[in-house]
Amino acid sequence: MAIKNPRSHDDYMVGWICVLLLEMAAAKLMLDVIYLTLSILLIDQNTYILGNIGDYNIVVMCLLAGVYSIISAVIIVIQLLSSFYSIYFGLLVGIGGRVPSSNIDIQLGDIVVS
């Protein structure tokens, strides 16, 4: 994983939101390249990890520790879009639990898309 000079704000198309800092650390390890940080607006309080996977430049951010709600997710996305205005895909990625069912048995580690 190499650290390189940053791209411009409009080079990033994917926003990767993590719920836990542990997930953000794992996301950082998934990046092929990590870029140095870019300047952001004063209203943007997020901490970002910038990088890419393949041809996709990605902005990784995390919810505030201990503040897990739809409202906090919306706030960080609004702040993200104020600094990175070319985001086209948003992913909320997190560690899931088990969802037992008589029809489908979803286990820890399974990927669930909704």
Image (cartoon, rainbow, N blue to C red):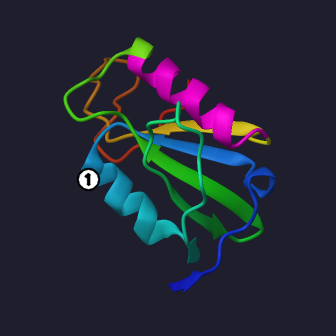
Task: Choose between 7 and 41: the one closer to the eye.
Answer: 41
Q: Residue at 36% across / 61% down in the picture? A: 26
Q: Position of residue 70 (x, y in %)?
A: 42, 14
Residue 73 colored in magenta in the image: yes
Percent coordinates x, y for residue 68 in the rendering: 29, 22
Q: Which residue is depicted at the point 43% across and 59% down?
A: 27
Q: Residue at the top extreme?
A: 71
Q: Nearer the viewer, residue 64 or 19?
A: 64
Residue 60 is a magenta residue: no
Q: Quadrant of residue 33?
A: bottom right
Please identify the quarter of the rendering in which residue 72 is found: top left
Local packing at callout 1 (Cα closer than 10 Å; few below 14, some 14-19, many 20+) is few
Per the image, the residue denoted by label 1 is 22
The quadrant in which residue 18 appears is top left
Magenta part of the chain: 72-85
* Image side of residue 113 versus residue 104, left or right: right
Q: What kind of residue is marked 1?
A: Leu
Task: Report the label total.
Answer: 1
Which residue is most to the front?
42
State whether residue 55 is above or below residue 67. Answer: below
User: Could you say whether the residue bearing mark 1 is in a helix, strand or loop?
Assistant: helix
Which is more toward the observer, 20 or 48? 48
